[in-house]
Image (tube, rainbow, N blue to C red):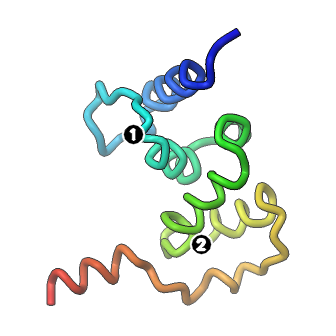
Amino acid sequence: MMTETAMKHLFFGRIRNKGLFWSYAPDITYDEGKDNLLCETVLKYGDIDDIRYLLVLYGESKVREVWERDVKSDARFKRLNYFLARVFFHLDVEASDFENLQHERLTKFRLLAG
């Protein structure tokens, strides 16, 4: 029986080998400090099986927390957010609910530029 940490290491490696950490070094490795990065990356770029496995490893509460904090407000992922909300988080939402959300990252960039 594998430990939870070993399962996370293997999953991280599988996601890395699929090329989903495209903006990081090719030899990026897992440590506990990268749990949020793994969740965010899988939510944005993983397939349905990846997301299902992510939910098994981290639980719906943790994955939803990362989604709400790091993915939900990103305007580039409106359709994805609608899909995730309805299918994986069982939320009663409409696509229009994701139209005018404040994007925290964009707000930070504007503050830095101003």
Q: Residue furthest top?
A: 1
Q: Residue at x 29, y 40 (%)?
A: 24
Disc 2 residue type?
Answer: Lys
Q: Is residue 1 above or below residue 102?
A: above
Q: Which mark is residue 78?
A: 2
Q: Amino acid at mark 1?
A: Phe
Q: Indicate which disc residue 21 carries.
A: 1
**Image quarter (top left, top right, bottom left or bottom right) of the C terminus:** bottom left
* Residue 96 placement: quadrant: bottom right
Taking the spot 45% from the left edge, 39% from the top edge, the residue there is: 20
Q: Residue at x 60, y 61 (%)?
A: 65
Q: Quadrant of residue 27?
A: top left
- Residue 89 lies, in percent from the top left, at 77, 60
How packed mark 2 is, by other alpha carbons closer than 10 Å (few <14, some 14-19, many 20 or more), is many
Q: Secondary structure at mark 2?
A: helix
Q: Alpha-carbon distance for marks 1 and 2? A: 21 Å
Is residue 20 or residue 89 the one in the foreground? 89
Question: Residue drawn at (48%, 42%), measured in percent from left and top?
Answer: 35
For label 1, the SS is: loop
Going by the image, does 38 lie left or right of 84? left
Q: Is residue 2 left or right of residue 90?
A: left
Quarter containing the N terminus: top right
